[in-house]
Image: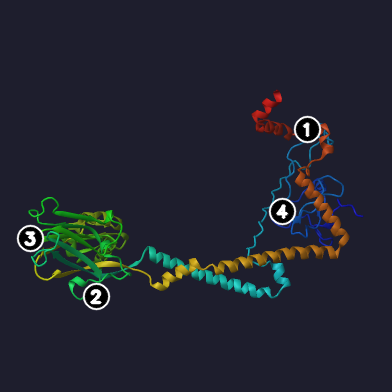
Amino acid sequence: MQNPNRPTAPLVPPHVQIQCGPQFTGHFRPPEPQAHAFGSPQTAPRIINPNGGISSPPTANLGTSGGTSMKRGASAQKPPSRLSGGGSSAGQGTASPLKTMELTPAVRRKKRKLAENEIPDKVAAILPESALYMQLREFECRMDAAIYRQKTDIEHTLRNPLRVQKTLRLYVFNTFVNQTDEQQNDGPPSWSLKIIGRILEDGNDSVVGVGNVLKSSDLYPKFSTFIKKMTVYLDHNLYPDNHVILWEGTRSPVPHEGFEVKRKGEKEFTAIIRLEMNYAPEKFKLSQALQEILGIDVDTRPRILAALWNYVKIRKLQIPGDPTSFMCDPPLRKILGEDKLKLSMVQQKIAPHLTAPHPIHLEHKIKLSGSVPAGNTCYDVLVDVPLMPGKENSSFLSNLDRNKEIEAIDKDICDAIKKIHEHLKRRAFFLGFSQSPAEFVNALLTSQARDLKLSAGDASHNMEKQHRSDFYNQAWVEDAVIRYLNRKPLGSEAAGNK
């Protein structure tokens, strides 16, 4: 039976000659003594166990009979740069041929890890039918990318929806009870003021009569979302204690279709309603001087800056040599106060000319006689309404979250690929055994013995060298002892002193 410690396969084939001469710039050529010190590297085949594990190839220690053994692709070891301690076989005054040699280990390229649903190239070469599976995977990747882009676009639209200008119609009317002898019931005379708003569909109102106000469509926000603050002023003489009713949107997160104010009373009066609109994005009212230049009354800040830039281009006020600045004509000089201004300073200069828009002022007379409801007045206000995605996009997102069938199929595919990997390892094991049974078994036993030593932690130990005093005269021993003492816990030292 062959010696298991002897390597069975050379690293370089016999017909390949290794040239030591320089073949490229920076090629290292060791001197003759150093070349003999390296020896001829050899290695043994890598063994694949039938149970799916991979055993390391057998290697011999440096300096043993039979030369050195290195793994294929492993980087070269850096030799010691100084002599060992006294008592070495080389003598005290002998210089080491490896002292001046400096080797830089090659960068080890990491092996690309296969995906869980990817077939290895070896399997693809054995099974031509696997090409169809790879084509389906490529098609699936393209479909996943398209679905991901569509999902991202829909989510972005939901977070930042496009806005279109719509008409918000306000209905203001009041109702009353127990105001005449015919209507007299158990309760006292009272009235109710109602303010309701809805977005018109295509500018048409399908409401018949003020009292039959329909609810807004589910595609549009409710009325209270367009109102920042609402104040209702009643007659101070009739209601001295609570003649001011205030509602703020920040204190009421729940949206409402409308508002209702109820009070007891039997006298008619005029109620004043002030509405501060909640513009999104925020709008500003321009000063009179800025309105004359831009022709805008109320608008958002980006549109105001765009209109001002358009004014500069039309009047050709931009400086040719300096595109970041422009000259101010007399109207602009009156507003900005500069003869020459940079574009980055425009927003700061026009800030004093932008104020909050004036609130909407409405008046309604509380009528306590005649038909119910009393009042047939409505008001139209232009608002920016977010354009929400249709039902198709909403159902698309919901189907992506609820569909578990694709995840189950992907799990089955990954399980099948794992079985293919296991069968590939088994095939490689039995194929190597069938080609050379004796050498295969010897190499397997050698690699398993080495793995056993590695697991036990004594693979790199040489007991014969450790029994000699020269082993403890090396340069690294002093540093190793200091490191060991520093890492030793205090508790174990105290226990040893006892």
Location of residue 164 in the rendering, given as x and y in whole percent from the top left corner:
30, 70
Side of 368 relative to 479 (left or right): left
Q: Label 4, on which residue?
A: 27
In the image, what residue type sits under mark 3? Lys
User: Helix, strand, or loop for circle 4?
Assistant: loop
Q: Label 2, on which residue?
A: 203
User: Helix, strand, or loop for circle 1?
Assistant: helix
Q: Which callout, 3 or 4, points at the residue further toward the start of the chain?
A: 4
Q: Quadrant of the C terminus?
A: top right
Q: Which callout, 1 or 4, points at the residue further toward the start of the chain?
A: 4
Confirm whether residue 286 shows in the render: no
User: Helix, strand, or loop for circle 3?
Assistant: loop
Q: Label 1, on which residue?
A: 472
In the image, what residue type sits under mark 4? His
Q: Which callout, 3 or 1, points at the residue further toward the start of the chain?
A: 3
Where residue 461 sits, quadrant-wise, is top right
CA–CA distance in space, label 1 to label 2: 98 Å
Location of residue 352 in the rendering, given as x and y in whole percent from the top left corner:
21, 54
Judged by depth in the image, the label closer to the viewer, 2 or 3, is: 3
